[in-house]
């Protein structure tokens, strides 16, 4: 059985696709890549079909990750049936997802899996800033990805 995770931000061109690439890499490092499917999406659809933001892609590439295949998608209510775990990058997206989630859906903040993050910690949106914002996002998603992999391993074993 495949465990399925979806990472969600606003437009699916910066945070959630960066997190998707990093989480897949982390799963591979832990030998779980064949047992876990990772996707990402946005709560809004205005970027649907677009590639990842150039700055996000450059940041990933500079650190040895490949995000070139990404195409933005919009998360819709019927997707909850597809995923075991839905992770929001910030509280606004979390609230949006929880409003449409059926009872029993596991919807959490992405950083809730980072043992060093405070309760309610978010992955900030780097879209309107410079390169340093994308570097920060990368570090935050790396830190939380280890905890997410541990959670998934506990769930599938």
Image (spheres, rainbow, N blue to C red):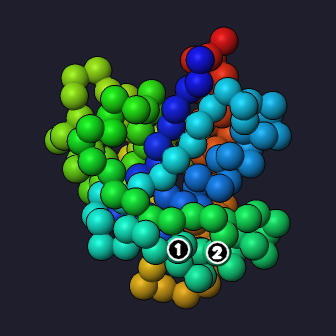
Q: Residues within 10 Å of mark 1 (few under 14, many from 20)?
A: some
- Depth check: give the residue in front, 42 or 110: 42
Is disc 2 surrounded by few (<14), some (14 to 19) or many (20+) residues within 10 Å? many
Quadrant containing the N terminus is top right
For the point 58% across and 55% down, the residue is 19
Residue located beneath label 1 in the image: 51
Which image quarter: residue 139?
bottom right
Callouts 1 and 2 close, C-beta under 8 Å: yes
Q: Is residue 47 above or below residue 24?
A: below
Between 126 and 25, the residue placed more toward the observer is 25
11 vs 55: above or below: above
Q: Which residue corresponds to the image point at 40% horizontal and 32% vertical from the top-left?
A: 82
**Vertical side of 2 occupied by 23: above or below:** below
Q: Nearer the viewer, residue 122 or 3?
A: 3
Q: Residue furthest top?
A: 157
Q: Which residue is mark 2?
A: 57
Precedes in sequence: disc 1 or disc 2:
1
List x then y, in percent, for residue 21.
65, 56
Real-space CA distance between mark 1 and mark 2, rounded to the nearest whole angstrom:
9 Å
Q: Position of residue 20 (x, y in %)?
A: 59, 52
Using residue 133 as the reference point, say whether residue 59 is left or right of it: right
Res. 9 in view: no
Residue at the spot x=37%, y=73% of the render? 47
What x and y, as percent, mark residue 6?
47, 43
Q: Is residue 18 visible?
A: yes
What element does badge 1 sit on? loop
- Expressed as whole percent of the image width and height from the top left, the position of residue 4 reads 52, 32
Question: Along the horizontal axis of the image, is 133 left or right of 108?
Answer: right
């Amino acid at each position: 059985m495949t465990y399925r995770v979806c990472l969600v931000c606003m437009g699916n061109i910066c945070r959630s696709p960066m997190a998707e690439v990093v989480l897949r890499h982390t799963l591979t490092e832990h030998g779980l890549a064949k047992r876990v499917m990772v996707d990402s999406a946005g709560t809004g659809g205005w970027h649907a079909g677009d590639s990842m933001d150039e700055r996000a892609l450059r940041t990933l590439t500079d650190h040895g990750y490949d995000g070139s295949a990404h195409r933005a998608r919009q998360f819709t209510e019927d997707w909850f049936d597809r995923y075991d775990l839905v992770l929001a990058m910030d509280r606004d997206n979390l609230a949006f997802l929880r409003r449409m989630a059926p009872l029993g859906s596991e919807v959490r903040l992405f950083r809730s899996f980072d043992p060093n993050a405070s309760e309610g910690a978010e992955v900030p949106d780097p879209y309107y800033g410079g390169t340093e914002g994308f570097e920060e996002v990368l570090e935050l998603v790396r830190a939380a990805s280890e905890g997410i992999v541990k959670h998934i391993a506990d769930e599938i074993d």
